[in-house]
Amino acid sequence: MTSDIRLAFAHPEERSVASASADPRDRISLRDHIVEVEIGAFQKERGHTQRVMFNVVVEVRPAPAPLDDDVDKILSYDRITEAIATELAAERLNLLETLAERVAERILAEPQAMRAFVRIEKLDVGPYKLGVEIVRSRAEAALKVMGQDGQEATLHPLVVFLDNATIHSAALPAILDRLVQHEGLPIILTVGLPDMVRPVTGHNPTQRRVDLLAIEQNAWVLAARDPRCVVMATRTEIDWAVKRGQMMVWAPSKLVLDAVDGPHSRAPVALALWLAETLAAERLIVHGDVALPAGSRVRVEKA
């Protein structure tokens, strides 16, 4: 028991050694990497940054050939710090657990990485540290889609904007059937404002929240029209569904409000385009008499 407790609070490198398999592996580590970032689920944690410390150990395959002192033949330490920086820049997160999962997944995408120990601690919450530590291995990594050549393939979902006439049309099930049958891609459905009176605040930040909540109400209306239309709000949910080729309906508030560099327009089609660009979508299909946005990084077409 004493040994178990000691290891529970030991550096990830000690944890790695203690749980090592019979197969020899090399280890690289990042110790006491401190970043100031806005993170946290509580309202008092919004609007300002706090110090977060990362300790990461990555078990890697031993090099199969002489290194020849060539940096391209190893997993560079920079790839660990880049994984952290990339995930911190992607969106504002509430949970250290989510950040740890994403950092580990990004590290394990490196071909040499076999197992990752990620410890993240908040340093400014009190006279102590609060943190989380996870261990993830390549064998346990989330399901990936494999191409015909046996290599991991990057999935580019299809984003579809549905106007209210389409949502309430008797033809909606047939429209969804065609998307599933003809596209062969994960489908993210987006909607606009419902045909109903909504509060007007006269204040841009609060009006933005009112409009986003109204769009989410409309998403639930669509969900009631077809059982395939599952409402999802978080990047984790969306990534999970995309990897499994599923259809979903986007509830935009969380991603939009947590985005480091969010959309500049509240227009529903502009939000759909922002989502498509954020997820590197294959294209955006727009249903209804809606003006198509210009200057997009993904292809936009009328249904």
Image: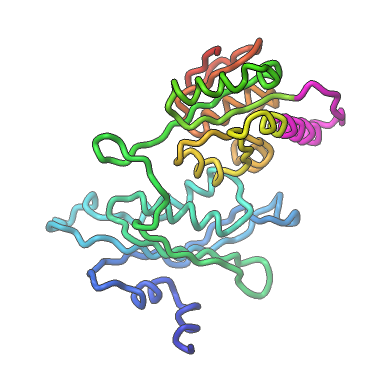
Q: Quadrant of the C terminus?
A: top right
Looking at the image, which residue is at 50% across and 34% down? 279
Looking at the image, which residue is at 63% across and 58% down? 50
- The colour style of the image is rainbow
Q: Is residue 142 magenta?
A: no
> Is 97 positioned to the left or the right of 75 in the image?
right
Image: 274 above or below 115? above
Q: Residue 90: percent from the left, percent from the top?
A: 53, 43
Q: How many marks?
A: 0
Nearer to me, 102 or 78:
102
> Is 211 positioned to the left or the right of 134 in the image?
right
Looking at the image, which residue is at 62% across and 16% down? 171
Q: Residue 66: percent from the left, percent from the top?
A: 12, 58
| Helix, strand or loop: magenta stretch | helix
Q: Residue 115: percent from the left, percent from the top?
A: 35, 62
Nearer to me, 247 or 15:
247
Q: Residue 249: percent from the left, percent from the top?
A: 61, 33
Q: Is residue 212 magenta?
A: yes
Nearer to me, 50 or 25:
25
Q: Which stretch is magenta?
A: 194-218
Nearer to me, 83 or 182:
182
Quarter of image, res 127: bottom right
Looking at the image, which residue is at 53% across and 54% down? 99
Quarter of image, res 126: bottom right
